[in-house]
Image (tube, coloured by chain):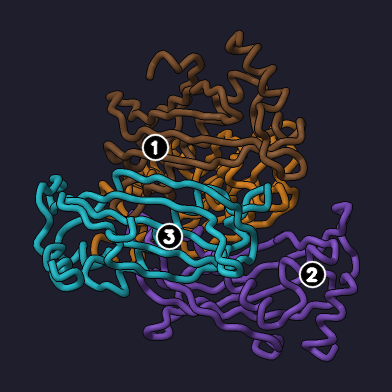
Chain colours: A purple, B brown, C orange, D cyan
Amino acid sequence: MAAEHLLTDVCQQKVRFSEVDSMKVVWHGNYVRYFEDGRESFGKRYSGIGYLDMYRNGFTAPIVDMHIQYLRSLTIGEEIQIETSYVDDPAAKLCFEYIIRRTSDGEIAAKGSTMQVFLDNSGQLCLSLPPFVEEWKRKWLNI
Amino acid sequence: MAAEHLLTDVCQQKVRFSEVDSMKVVWHGNYVRYFEDGRESFGKRYSGIGYLDMYRNGFTAPIVDMHIQYLRSLTIGEEIQIETSYVDDPAAKLCFEYIIRRTSDGEIAAKGSTMQVFLDNSGQLCLSLPPFVEEWKRKWLNI
Amino acid sequence: MAAEHLLTDVCQQKVRFSEVDSMKVVWHGNYVRYFEDGRESFGKRYSGIGYLDMYRNGFTAPIVDMHIQYLRSLTIGEEIQIETSYVDDPAAKLCFEYIIRRTSDGEIAAKGSTMQVFLDNSGQLCLSLPPFVEEWKRKWLNI
Amino acid sequence: MAAEHLLTDVCQQKVRFSEVDSMKVVWHGNYVRYFEDGRESFGKRYSGIGYLDMYRNGFTAPIVDMHIQYLRSLTIGEEIQIETSYVDDPAAKLCFEYIIRRTSDGEIAAKGSTMQVFLDNSGQLCLSLPPFVEEWKRKWLNI
């Protein structure tokens, strides 16, 4: 799969007290936020497809599919690394893969993926990539 | 304070697994959701000032002050009662008081209050009550 | 897949204001809570494998895999039905499938699945089903 | 009040997409997390009374009172500064005051306060400060 990962960003986070459940581990639903933090950081590094770019261009990109595998638990105060990779796809979709590692020893806590589609101003599904995304791909992927 | 409570609603909730922290008690921030559930239920019973009514009339009512006192902890699976009371105020504000009780024994887990102001379509603060709120007061409070 | 769904529960929820994002639709991460609400309701109906049963028997059942497909968006105030079905599996796992429907018209908003494993008191992975789960299967599935 | 603020920490955060509500501003309940981030950062700087210190010493410090005033709204992507100040109190309590500012222009978005009490291992309320907190005060406040 490595070949597809043309663009990758790694950001840091710290497990918050409020993210941990009664088992003293991060509640599984909170990994969705880590993925979102990852996309945010990715969008800052490879500028042009962040939330505000979408908004300015008159599009939204709702998530239509999400998959998370949990490998090791995380607990309060642990530092984590969120690795977010763009997965190129010829269709009018935006796909990312994620790896969340415990910073201290590099152990993988979770892996996952998300798929987004594009909706235009009137809420219609885009069957081809919006121009600003095409431009983003030319800029960062030379394709 | 009882005299001010002309309108009161009581609704039920159950403590969710994801609302409990590593101490196995409801995380203090989640009471904000219980208050919101209380306002929602209140707005359903005394119709006319719910979120959608605001929206239809071109207003929003952001919270500008919130106070919560925590008296007893709540844990997973406990049923709670959220008592939401309207506190009448001559100013252009919307004030509620809340009491959260454990259903099983009626013990008070928390008390609190919120104050909202009204913003019009252009985001300007309303110095007098919007007409639809005046109408709501006439309907439910005869004032 | 219907053949596997020997046990199914349907519960109701209402979309909360705080669950909706800036696009005025339920934030995709909040469906994780709906699935949890579904398991909770399922566990109440088919008693014996709820969170407290696990706890009393000295086990925990962390989620190791979650998949969500988003088909239609949901917005503030909409009533939803969460259908939670047990998927029998010979391995030492606990698998559920979910369908979330808008109550008003029955349209499917999301589908998903979760897989849980069992950890004993010392945090060790159980390679066979804990006795209390075997008993639960005999009781509700006659197997 | 400035005289009481013997110890202050300032940390940075960025408003997350998932923290913003359908009005496109940070949902009022999410400020509770910002305060918690503030206490966490404070505890890191003035070490000795963080969550893990409490835990190691056999105490917990639940919040018994919280007050938040909302002055200006915050929106997606804005950077914020969380200023957390220790408010000394002769009683067996832990009190903090918070100021949340928009980093770009220094405007105050919210102010607030929290009060915590100490519970010992058996869940009993401490009527005097636990020794490790006394020690912390000697270390950082010379009192």
In front here: B79 or D90?
D90
Q: Quadrant of residue B62?
A: top right
Report how far apart the C-alphas of labels 2 and 3 lie in the structure.
30 Å
Q: Which of D61 and C91 is in front in this view?
A: D61
**Sequence-wise, which precedes: disc 2 or disc 3?**
3
Q: Can residue A35 be seen in this view?
A: no
Q: How crowded is mark 1: few (under 14 residues within 10 Å), some or many (20 or more)?
A: few
Q: Name the residue under label 3.
A: A19
Verify CB contact (< 8 Å) between mark 3 and mark 1: no
The residue that mark 2 highlights is: A93
Give the CA separation, mark 3 to mark 1.
Answer: 28 Å
Place of residue A42 in the rendered image (x, y in percent of width and height, measured from the top left)? 65, 78
Q: Mark 1 lies on which chain?
A: C
Q: What element carries label 1?
A: loop
The answer as to whether the residues below labels 3 and 1 share one chain is no
Q: Which of marks 2 and 3 is in front?
A: 3
Q: What residue type is labelled 2?
A: Lys
What crowding class fits label 3: few (fewer than 14 Cα within 10 Å), some (14-19), or many (20 or more)? many
Left or right of B137 in this view: A12:
left
Q: How far apart are marks 1 and 2 (CA)?
A: 42 Å
Q: In the rendered structure, are the residues bearing label 1 and label 2 in contact, judged by CB atoms less than 8 Å apart?
A: no
Q: Name the residue under label 1.
A: C47
Three-letter amino acid code of the residue under disc 1: Ser
Residue occupying the point 90% across, 69% down? A128
Q: Residue D67's spot in the image, x, y percent?
A: 40, 45
Name the residue rendered at 72%, 45% in the picture. Answer: B123
